[in-house]
Amino acid sequence: MVIAIERRNLRDFDWLLAFVAIGIVAFGAIQIRNAQPTQNFWIKQLIGLGIALIAMLVVAFTDYRKLLNIAPAFYIFGLLLLVAVLIPGIGLKINGHRSWIRVPGLGQFQPSEFVKVTTAMMLARYFGKHRQTALTLTEAIVGGIILGLPIALVLLEHDVGSVITYLPILLIVLFLSAMRMRLVVAALLLSVVVIPAAYWVE
């Protein structure tokens, strides 16, 4: 894997996975066009696909360690977006959720989806150190804070659906970081409390 990263060889790229993902998005665009032929939603879908392809190639042929080095900048930028979406006049309220920002020429953009990536990057940077011992409670708490900040801001948007999708990110990272079993149990119990509480807040 390290050799493949260093060489950036096209033969090492997972073309099958890329084509499957492109095919799924293209199929979705066709279905959107069939469902609403008089609207331009399917065109926006294809524009989004084009932007995603560029981002995919940039990330695929960039050393992931360089991306993790600037993870804090991405993380802070994502938090600023979540704050901006709460400001009336900047954030759009759709279906009772103030979780969208209008991007001229492209339509609406949901920062909470972007912040999932930046949060995962920040957690990977923090927990990605070589370790000889199990994860400590302090490290787990810091990881919880890293995840808790965007979750708190998303809760203010009343977007509980997005909050639920954030929780597995931390659980997976903690598991891969050799967390003690009692902390695993504590994290699961916390999830049982947080999810119903999030619905109550909404």
Image: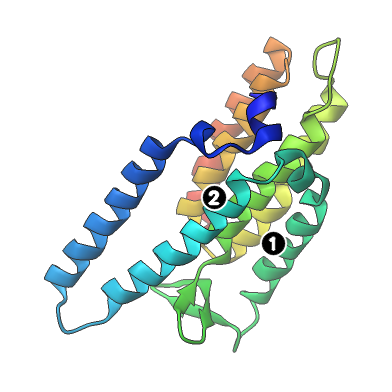
Q: Is residue 194 left or right of residue 106?
A: right
Question: Which quadrant, please, contains the N terminus?
Answer: top right
Q: How is the image coloured?
A: rainbow
Residue visible at 86% across and 10% down in the picture? 132
Q: Is residue 186 visible?
A: no
**Residue located beneath label 2 in the image:** 163
| SS at circle 2 | helix
Q: Is residue 43 left or right of residue 173?
A: left
Specify the quadrant of the image occupied by residue 41. bottom left
Residue nearest the viewer, comparing 56 with 6: 6
- Identify whether 76 is placed above or below 15: below
**Residue located beneath label 1 in the image:** 78
Residue 29 spot, x, y in % from top left: 25, 64
Of the two numbered discs 1 and 2 on the same chain, state the one appearing first in sequence.
Answer: 1
Residue visible at 63% across and 18% down in the picture? 185
| SS at circle 1 | helix
Mark sitting on residue 161: none
Specify the quadrant of the image occupied by residue 82. bottom right
Residue nearest the viewer, comparing 73 with 191: 73
Residue visible at 77% across and 50% down in the picture? 71
Residue 55 spot, x, y in % from top left: 56, 57
Residue 100 spot, x, y in % from top left: 51, 73
Residue 3 spot, x, y in % from top left: 68, 25
* Gap between marks 1 and 2 measured at Cα: 15 Å
Q: Amino acid at mark 2?
A: Val
Q: Is residue 116 left or right of residue 42?
A: right
Residue nearest the viewer, comparing 104 with 21: 21
Q: Amino acid at mark 1?
A: Gly
